[in-house]
Amino acid sequence: MPNVTIQSRVKPELKQEAEAIFDAIGLSMGDAIRLFLQQSVNIGGLPFQPMVKQPNAETLAALDELESGQGKRFATVDELFADLEAD
């Protein structure tokens, strides 16, 4: 069976970042796309669970602090900015 061509438009930054990753593991962009497509067919779905980027450790710690009631609270935006400027 002859091969077909697939075209997709992506932002230049995304392409560059992905190419750097694929180059580091010895894959071309085409190889990586073929691998993705084959794995999708093999498992009958996406070969990963889509998710948003995970927060870093500092952000997670700040969220934990707020959820435990330890964070600062402000009645107005002006109070918030005054506190930020004081630090």
Image (cartoon, helix red, strand yellow):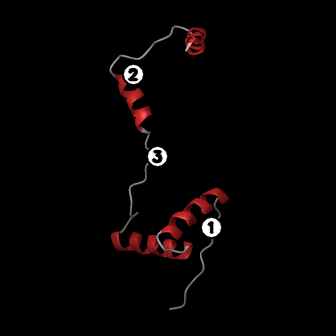
Nearer-the-camera pick, 8 or 11? 11
Q: Nearer the viewer, mark 2 or mark 1?
A: 2
The vertical placement of 14 against 25, above or below, is above
Which residue occupies 48% across, 76% down?
34
Q: Which mark is residue 52?
A: 3
Local secondary structure at mark 1: loop
Q: Amino acid at mark 3?
A: Val
Q: Amino acid at mark 1?
A: Ser
Q: Amino acid at mark 2?
A: Leu
Mark earlier in primary sequence (2, 3): 3
Q: CA distance from mark 2 to mark 1?
A: 42 Å
Task: Report x, y in % for residue 51.
Answer: 43, 49
Task: Report x, y in % for residue 14.
Answer: 60, 58
Task: Report x, y in % for residue 27.
Answer: 50, 74
Residue of label 2 = 66
Q: Nearer the viewer, mark 3 or mark 1?
A: 3
Local secondary structure at mark 2: helix
Mark earlier in primary sequence (3, 1): 1
Q: CA distance from mark 3 to mark 1?
A: 22 Å
Mark earlier in primary sequence (2, 1): 1
Q: Quadrant of residue 77?
A: top right
- Considering every residue shown, the one lying at the far bottom of the view is 1
Local secondary structure at mark 3: loop
In the rendered structure, the answer to whether residue 86 lies left or right of residue 54 reads right
Q: Which mark is residue 8?
A: 1
- Give the total of numbered labels: 3
Q: CA distance from mark 2 to mark 3?
A: 21 Å
User: Do residues under tags 3 and 1 come within 8 Å of each other at their CB atoms?
Assistant: no
The vertical placement of 34 against 50, above or below, is below
Which residue occupies 42% across, 75% down?
38
User: Do residues under tags 2 and 3 come within 8 Å of each other at their CB atoms?
Assistant: no
Q: Residues within 10 Å of mark 1 (few under 14, many from 20)?
A: few
